[in-house]
Image (spheres, grey):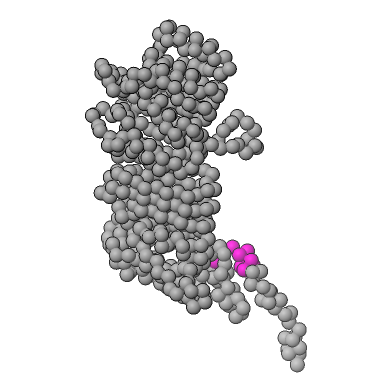
Amino acid sequence: MGRSSKRSQRPADLISVLPEDLLLEILERLGSARAAAGTSLLSRRWRGLWTRLPSLTLSLRDLPFGSIQAALHRAARPGVYIYHLNIRVAGQAGMIGAGTFSSFLRDAASLSPVELRLTLPRNLQVSCMEATLPSFHRATSMDLRARALHLAVFAKPCAASGWYVPFRSLERLCLSGCHIDLATFIPFCPRLRVLRLNTTGLIDMSNITVHSASLEELVVEHGNRWTGRTHISISVDSPVLKQLTASFHACGNIGVSILAPMLDKVWWRCSYAKPIYGLGLWGLSEMGFNTQETDSGRDACVQLPSVHVLSLHISAVQDSVSFPNAELSFEAEIDKHMVTNFSGLDLHLSTKGHVFGAFVLHLLGMHQIRTALRNLKIVLLRSEVKDACPVNCLCDEPKNWRTETITLADLENMEIEGVGGEDHEFDFLKVIFRCAPMLKTVTVRLSDGVTPSVDWCTKVNNMFMAYPSIECNADLVSRAKAVC
């Protein structure tokens, strides 16, 4: 009777009856996965609860593929959940069958990770057959890095909603070296906010289609400089996209379609393997967009307004190159990259000794540039060895460009770097002063090592004095770089 009375007076287990989120917090404070797992011996209420810890991490790094596969298979059992799953296969040359790798991914998916990171070494490849990417229904972040890994996603019908959404929680996705049909995959990710793609080395990944109602940030790096495919296609339709970063090389025709009305920050670069588009002697080698903050001297606590700047890198072509339908093709190529409105133009010219005035005025006269331009920056890139422009060179055609009048109604600021003290440079400045009634500031920077003649300096000074309402500056130090 005495023992029974003492047993009945034992304090009730008030901890085990707490809500699960509080029990998980208790396990979290133990600070050790081993200690948390030991609580499974306390009672049925605690059994397996540790596997739901939000900070539980399974890290399998720098091990052979077979060892990691075996470890995943052992860990994949009912009731075991992982928060962070970090897998990095050790460097080993070889080939893995698509079926084997699909099984490997299924074991990883059975752990229901919230964050998944999987890295395969470059010398370990999965066969060119498509491996099946299973459902990671709890995953909010996935980072897959491999070399030419072909993945396919299959959605099975669901009686309740019609279709099962395999990546319904996914918010961040990074794919590097992974070939997957984005047009099919992205709709399975209804909460995706950030998408990062690196398709370098994927010859068959030249068509990038991203249509998402939730995407806010997109990064695309397409570094295939010399591919056999001549056509690249990029299609983006994201109504809430705010940041876009894209870098790619084009060896031929490229199709661009960007529909992103809320786009705020952009960094866009397209490099050409050789001059395909141009006018006369001038060929387009790179073009892009970027977002720049203005009034950087203000209080750092004040949010600075930003502007979008169109960047063109153009070189004088040494060999005799014929650009078919030059003017139409050149304007169309620039127009297709107009991923957002702009107000600034950064023009980088590799002149190779040629007169640039006629070409630049033609460029500024294009409708899509002339009607938007408020800020103009020209950087003249010169060779270390001075090039000589041949007599009667086409670069100075038409001859009447010095008296030409174009309407630059909104141009407010102009900066030109790398000036060499040539008469044709002065002639170009005169045209700009005459054609830009709203001009506020002009800055001229001489090329390194250049000492202009007294006559040239006098003419420039007199021109500056003729426009007292314009703030004019002439710096003797230039940041223009020499090019070979």
Check residue 127 for magenta coloring: no
Q: Nearer the viewer, residue 65 or 223?
A: 223
- Asked which quadrant contains residue 365, the reply is top left
Q: Residue at x 73, y 82 (%)?
A: 10
What is the quadrant of the N terminus in the image? bottom right
Q: Nearer the viewer, residue 337 or 83?
A: 337
Q: Residue at x 41, y 40 (%)?
A: 335
Q: Give the residue at the far bottom of this rendering.
A: 1
- Asked which quadrant contains residue 124, the reply is bottom left
**Image: magenta residue range:** 24-33
Q: Nearer the viewer, residue 344 or 140?
A: 344
Tell me if I can see residue 89 in this picture.
Answer: no
Q: Residue at x 47, y 53 (%)?
A: 237
- Asked which quadrant contains residue 468, the reply is top right
Classify residue 441 as left or right of residue 356. Answer: right
Residue 448, percent from left and from top: 40, 18
Q: Residue at x 39, y 56 (%)?
A: 145
What is the quadrant of the C terminus in the image? top left
Q: Nearer the viewer, residue 259 or 316?
A: 259
Q: Is residue 178 above or below residue 296?
A: below
Q: Is residue 353 above or below residue 63?
A: above
Residue 149, percent from left and from top: 34, 59
Classify residue 318 as left or right of residue 259. Answer: left
Residue 9, percent from left and from top: 76, 84
Q: Is residue 127 above or below residue 451?
A: below
Tell me if I can see residue 182 in this picture.
Answer: yes
Residue 459, percent from left and from top: 45, 10
Classify residue 17 as left or right of residue 330. Answer: right
Q: Is residue 39 above or below residue 281?
A: below
